[in-house]
Image (tube, rainbow, N blue to C red):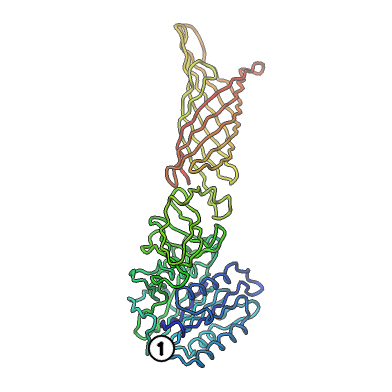
Amino acid sequence: MLALVALCGVAHAGSRYALVLGNDAGDRDEQRLRYAELDADRLAASLVGLGGFASGDIVVVRGGDADTARAALIALNARIRQVGASDAMLVVYYSGHADAERLHLGASSLPLPQLEQLVRGSPAAFRMLIVDACRSGALTRVKGGTVGAPVPIVLGETLAADGVVLWTASAASEQAQESDAIKGSFFTHFLVSGLAGPADADGDGEVTTTEAYEYARAGTLRASSRTLAGMQHPTFRDELAGRDSIVLTRPGTLGPRRARLRVPAGRDVLILAGGPEGPVIAEVGLHDRVRTLNVRAGTYFVRARLETHLLEGAVAIAVGEEKAVDDSALTRVSYVRVAAKGVVERPRRDIIEAGMIVRTALVDDGACAGAIAGYVFDLGWVTVAPRLSGCRERAGNVFLASTTDALALDVRVAHAWQVGPIAVSAQVQLGGAAVIQRFSTMGVAPSRTTGAVLFGVGVGIALPLSRNLTANLAAELTSVTLERDPMHRETALGIGTMLGIGVVR
């Protein structure tokens, strides 16, 4: 998705205007987007809550066509011209489908050069255009780059020079991406998150254009690098006539009905409105130094992602309050449990496991002790694990000593329930074994090999040691049918325990 930003200086709240466009529909051959209109709502809310925009000076158009968008921008320019404020600021934002030449607003289209001209031709002293759509890097014709040090411009200041900055959320040949996990596009998600505070790299309570761009760019690169579509590279072109950056939001200042929410360090944190199914308000990354968000007072659902589990829960915050989220107020939840609720995409977690096994004797009097190894295929609701095991029994008296080796190949099918950090499982297994007996005696006692069929049930527990390592303990009851010869079969019961380590792939 493209994000083109022509940014303007921050004037006082009465002379700041915005047109916010979101359209989930594109051309007939384009898949309908899920979150473009939601992206528009989130950006508009950030401008009102943090950017000093009056709600009456923001025009939000959801699902409108090209004529509606064009007319709204022309009317907004006329309104700015009528007011005649010399320090007026205009923000225009679009989220939806596009190509390198035009925006696709449903069945209609708006040429990108025309949109750029309408923004540049505005009577506002400074203009900000944000277009979050695909293949729009042609607007900047620049890949990558480094923005200079910020020159903050606070509310109430006026710039004599005109200024424009173009941002794109993707290069000219790239697809912009949206995510079900964050319920939005990558670029807008990280832009809105940064404007709430995390992008404030110097900790002065203000987010400048430089800080917002660098934060959104880094977050987009990081998130898109883990997707099948590959990395999308935000780009920019600076036309601020020597001024490197402008203050966009002031998260360090509490406005009416606002509060501050501080999240713990050492983990990625998502903030959702209301509950676990609510819209994502912001994200604070693992390495973000600023971990305080300026939010509306209310109830939020916090989900912190640690290496072995999640911590999540509801947090209420009052007007003017600064609340620190404490781990003790959150519930520990395994990744498997969250996936079952459909909140977080569940990765497949196959496991290589190995350990020691001890069970009661099948033939001789002594316990059968040995080793077991297997591979666990994670199929979602159940796991299927082929396993190879071997153990040895010993017995003897003054006349005879025997050694019995049991080599077994079985398949275990298990289902797990999460109880806090521990996974409790029930299983059944079916397989075959070869039982080899060797004798030591003064007389003649030849070795013999017996075939066996085994069937069993069991229970187990798994405790995570790290994100990719688990400790496993299982108890099994196994029925083994030994076939001495075609006419002679006998059945023995074996009770065993297995202690092992699992490595998650």
Res 309 visible: yes
The number of discs equals: 1
Q: Residue at image x 48%, y 17%?
A: 366
Q: Nearer the viewer, residue 4 or 265?
A: 265
Q: Image quarter for residue 109?
A: bottom right
351 vs 237: above or below: above
Q: Residue at image x 54%, y 43%?
A: 418
Res 216 visible: no
Q: Residue at image x 60%, y 68%?
A: 33
310 vs 386: above or below: below
Q: Secondary structure at mark 1?
A: loop
Residue 67 image point, x, y percent:
62, 84
Residue 187 image point, x, y percent:
48, 69
272 vs 410: above or below: below
Tell me the amino acid under the disc marked 1.
Asp
Residue 349 image point, x, y percent:
51, 47
Residue pointed to by mark 1: 162
Q: Residue at image x 45%, y 58%?
A: 269
Q: Is residue 160 left or right of residue 98?
A: left
